[in-house]
Amino acid sequence: MASRTTVGWSLVSSGVVTLLLAYLPGDSVWWGLALLLVGIAALFVRRG
């Protein structure tokens, strides 16, 4: 059950991020990298 929730949230968040990247100014590659780093940091903070 937990894996289903994780997949669901992953899909929702990736959809939101895709929409955000379309509207944010500047190069979307840099925004993508920044969001990726924030996501990785959030995962490590949650585990610890």
Image (cartoon, rainbow, N blue to C red):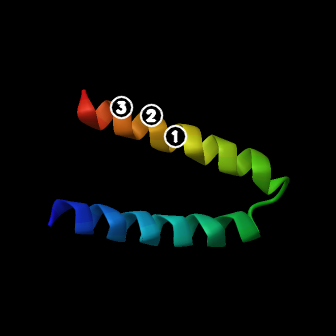
**What mark, if any, has residue 6 been given in the picture?**
none
Q: Give the secondary structure at mark 1.
A: helix
**What mark, if any, has residue 38 been given in the picture?**
1
Amino acid found under the numbered disc labelled 3: Phe
Q: Give the secondary structure at mark 3.
A: helix
Relative image position of residue 28 (x, y in whole percent): 78, 56
Amino acid found under the numbered disc labelled 1: Val
**Which residue lies at the image location 84% right of the left edge and 53% below the top edge?**
27
Q: Nearer the viewer, residue 7 or 44?
A: 7
Which residue is label 2 attached to? 41
Q: Quadrant of the C terminus?
A: top left
**Which residue lies at the image location 64% right of the left edge and 42% below the top edge?**
34
Disc 2 to disc 1: CB gap under 8 Å: yes
Disc 3 to disc 2: CB gap under 8 Å: yes
Relative image position of residue 26 (x, y in whole percent): 85, 54
Task: Tell which tag, 3 or 1, sits nearer the viewer.
Answer: 3
Which residue is label 3 attached to? 44
What residue occupies the far left of the structure in this picture? 1
Q: Give the secondary structure at mark 2.
A: helix
Left or right: where does residue 8 sit relative to residue 4? right
Amino acid found under the numbered disc labelled 2: Ala
**With respect to residue 41, does 11 lie above or below?**
below
Q: Nearer the viewer, residue 25 or 46?
A: 46
